[in-house]
Image (cartoon, grey):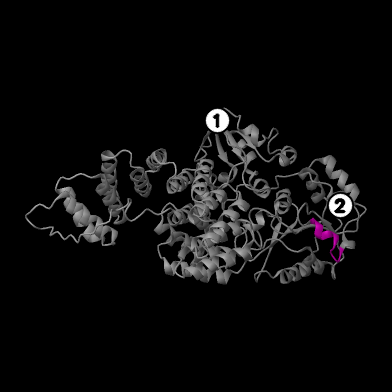
């Protein structure tokens, strides 16, 4: 999983510039002064303040506190005392009192830049970010060379989402103090958020160059390398952070995430459990553990970990979203679809294809004549799967507008889903009614295996295109098996293991008189050039490879005898058409497919072949090959 907001805050806390123990230069104190604080006599202002400064400079904070308080109780005023006392109070966790004391110092000496700087630190600590910005800016106005003020200002601007301003501020800090490892680390974090990952890497490496033992810098470098998909180097960097700080819970947590991406799930589990051992209150660690356990197929343990996350942090959107995936896999659709709404607030939140100006509704009212804009979201397969509800809602009397990916528009029109589908840009211009994300319809319609709502085929091509491809494919040897083996490269990061190397399909040609037809487009299609059974594909394959239009691909599918696919949009397209589909699934698939059934209520014409062992596609293909030999319905039905 991506790092959570809370973890980011922890890192920012670590990398903030430090304040001085005593924020002003103490004059040399040659005399050994001792004051009895409970005496009836009143020591002089100078003796009290000198003794307070002496204890403070020696690190004897408890004694320093006594003298600072005695000084104040005597009614004396000195801006240095109130400023210094404010730092101590803040370090003791008495933030409100620290603020009062520091503001008093500023009242006594408005030109004290460091007092404004210290106030900024206090205000940030109590969440008054806007006020902290004002304090840091005042400190900089009074002393433009105060590098730490620029650096800390950058951190707050980052928290406020003002990343470009934050970059300017931290670069000024570096200009003033080029050897400040903290500032270079802070710049790396800001650049990472700006998605300037290579620059972020350079800045973080500079922090490490300045301070090779900077555990936090090694940790952040590992996080950046993870985002760059340089996973082995990310692992090395994060392990270095742990070597430097063996009790660094956040480093074990990040290492667990990297190991998960490397598909080392057992090691990922161990590392994440270590993070929890070091910091049982680290909500993200429980959440990540739940995610790892889900991928390991330990769903009950995963649910326990996720619920622990929610107990620790009741607004943890990632945890609720992960809980929804577990519930849906278990076919608990009521709660699962409710929690699936957290996809819009989790890290890496789902973004609808278009941002309407209309009010978003929480629930469909199903009142006749209501105007409702439905906006697609996520991948093409999601749109193909859930657009079935558009005609259903229209038949209930609602006035529906449908915004979807442009490349699906011709298919949507031919299928009579919507005769005038909107582009994402056009959806922003709709001025009447309300709107709802497409994948929220299943929740509102209370879809479940017992209540599928729509089971009949709802996607089709045109008669003209069907005839065209019937004529072209009539020259081919039957039966024709359309295959698709590779998912979208971007989705592979979050749905690792769903794709199948094309060569794995070679077993299907043994003992089966079949002809393959590749439905693969883009990434992965290059495997066709080097596969060992290239001669088993239809002669018109080059023409098919040049066909990217979904409407025409639907006509090609219509003229195949069987579709065999991994979990991609092609499976949803064929399933929505009512074509015979054999879907090949990894051991823990996407929530749509559940965990056990060989069929699915989503597509009655689909049969599911599941991995019995993680990564073992050979065994799956053996079963598919046997099924092909006994598949009596695969006949030349299109001649």
- Compared with 578, 139 (above or below) is above
Residue 195 percent location from the top left of the image: 60, 48
Of discs 1 and 2, which sits in the foreground?
1
Q: Residue furthest front?
A: 30
At mark 1, the secondary structure is loop
For the question of whether residue 329 can be seen, the reply is: no
7 with respect to 543 (left or right)? left
Q: Label 2: which residue?
A: 638
Residue 102 percent location from the top left of the image: 29, 45
**Disc count in the image?**
2
Q: Is residue 536 magenta?
A: no
Q: Quadrant of residue 589?
A: bottom right
Near mark 2 (Cα within 10 A), the count class, few <14, some 14-19 or many ≥20, is some
- Compared with 502, 412 (above or below) is above
Q: Please give the range of residues in magenta.
A: 525-533
At mark 2, the secondary structure is loop
Q: Label 1: which residue?
A: 433
The residue sitting at 28% across, 49% down in the picture is 98
For the question of whether residue 599 can be seen, the reply is: yes
Residue 7 percent location from the top left of the image: 47, 56
Q: Quadrant of residue 256?
A: bottom right
Foreground residue among 533 and 571? 533
Q: Residue furthest right?
A: 475
Identify the disc placed on residue 327.
none
The residue sitting at 56% across, 30% down in the picture is 369
């Amino acid at each position: 999983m991506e790092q959570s907001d809370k973890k980011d805050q922890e890192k920012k806390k670590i990398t903030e510039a430090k304040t001085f123990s005593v924020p002003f230069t103490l004059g040399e104190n040659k005399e050994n002064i001792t004051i009895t604080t409970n005496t009836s006599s009143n020591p002089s202002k100078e003796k009290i303040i000198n003794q307070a400064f002496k204890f403070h400079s020696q690190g004897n904070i408890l004694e320093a506190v006594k003298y600072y308080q005695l000084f104040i109780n005597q009614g004396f005023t000195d801006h240095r005392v109130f400023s210094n006392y404010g730092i101590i109070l803040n370090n003791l966790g008495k933030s409100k009192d620290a603020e009062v004391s520091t503001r008093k110092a500023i009242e006594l000496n408005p030109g004290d830049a460091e007092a404004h700087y210290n106030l900024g630190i206090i205000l940030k600590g109590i969440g008054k970010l806007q006020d902290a910005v004002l304090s840091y800016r005042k400190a900089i106005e009074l002393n433009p060379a105060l590098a730490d003020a620029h650096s800390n200002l950058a951190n707050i601007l980052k928290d406020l989402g003002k990343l470009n301003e934050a970059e300017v501020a931290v670069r000024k800090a570096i200009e003033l103090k080029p050897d400040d490892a903290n500032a270079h680390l802070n710049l790396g974090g800001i650049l990472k958020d700006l998605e300037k990952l290579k620059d972020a890497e350079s800045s973080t490496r500079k922090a490490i160059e300045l301070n090779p033992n900077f555990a936090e810098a090694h940790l952040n470098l590992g996080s950046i390398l993870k985002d760059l998909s340089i996973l082995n180097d990310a692992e090395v960097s994060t392990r270095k952070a742990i070597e430097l700080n063996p009790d660094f819970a956040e480093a074990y947590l990040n290492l667990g995430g990297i190991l998960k991406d490397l598909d080392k799930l057992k090691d990922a589990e161990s590392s994440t459990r270590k993070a929890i051992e070091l910091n049982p209150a680290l909500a993200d660690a429980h959440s990540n553990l739940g995610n790892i356990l889900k991928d390991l197929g330990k769903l009950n343990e995963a649910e326990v970990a996720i619920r622990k996350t929610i107990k620790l942090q009741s607004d943890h959107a990632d945890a609720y979203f992960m809980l929804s995936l577990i519930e849906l896999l278990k076919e608990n659709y009521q709660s699962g679809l409710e929690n699936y709404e957290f996809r819009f607030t989790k890290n890496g939140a789902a973004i609808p294809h278009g941002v309407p100006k209309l009010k978003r509704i929480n629930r469909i009212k199903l009142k006749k004549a209501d105007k409702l804009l439905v906006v697609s979201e996520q991948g093409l397969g999601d749109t193909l799967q859930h657009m079935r509800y558009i005609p259903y809602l229209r038949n209930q009397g609602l006035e529906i507008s449908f915004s979807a990916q442009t490349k699906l528009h011709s298919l949507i029109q031919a299928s009579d889903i919507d005769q005038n589908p909107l582009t994402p840009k056009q959806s922003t211009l709709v001025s009447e009614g309300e709107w709802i994300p497409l994948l929220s319809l299943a929740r509102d319609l209370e879809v479940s295996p017992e209540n599928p709502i729509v089971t009949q085929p709802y996607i089709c091509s045109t008669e003209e295109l069907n005839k065209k491809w019937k004529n072209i494919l009539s020259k081919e040897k039957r039966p024709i098996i359309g295959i698709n083996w590779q998912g979208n490269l971007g989705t592979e990061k979050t749905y690792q293991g769903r794709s199948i190397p094309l060569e794995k399909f070679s077993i299907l040609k043994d003992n089966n008189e079949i002809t393959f037809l590749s439905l693969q487009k883009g990434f992965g299609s290059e495997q066709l050039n080097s596969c060992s059974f290239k001669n088993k594909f239809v002669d018109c394959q080059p023409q098919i490879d040049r066909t990217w239009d979904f409407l025409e691909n639907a006509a090609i599918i219509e003229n195949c005898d069987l579709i065999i696919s991994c979990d991609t949009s092609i499976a949803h397209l064929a399933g929505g058409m009512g074509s015979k589909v054999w879907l090949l699934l990894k051991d823990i698939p996407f929530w749509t497919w559940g965990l056990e059934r060989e069929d699915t209520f989503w597509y009655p014409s689909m049969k599911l072949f599941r991995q019995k062992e993680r990564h073992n596609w050979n065994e799956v293909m053996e079963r598919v090959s046997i099924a092909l030999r006994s598949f009596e319905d695969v006949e030349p039905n299109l001649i």
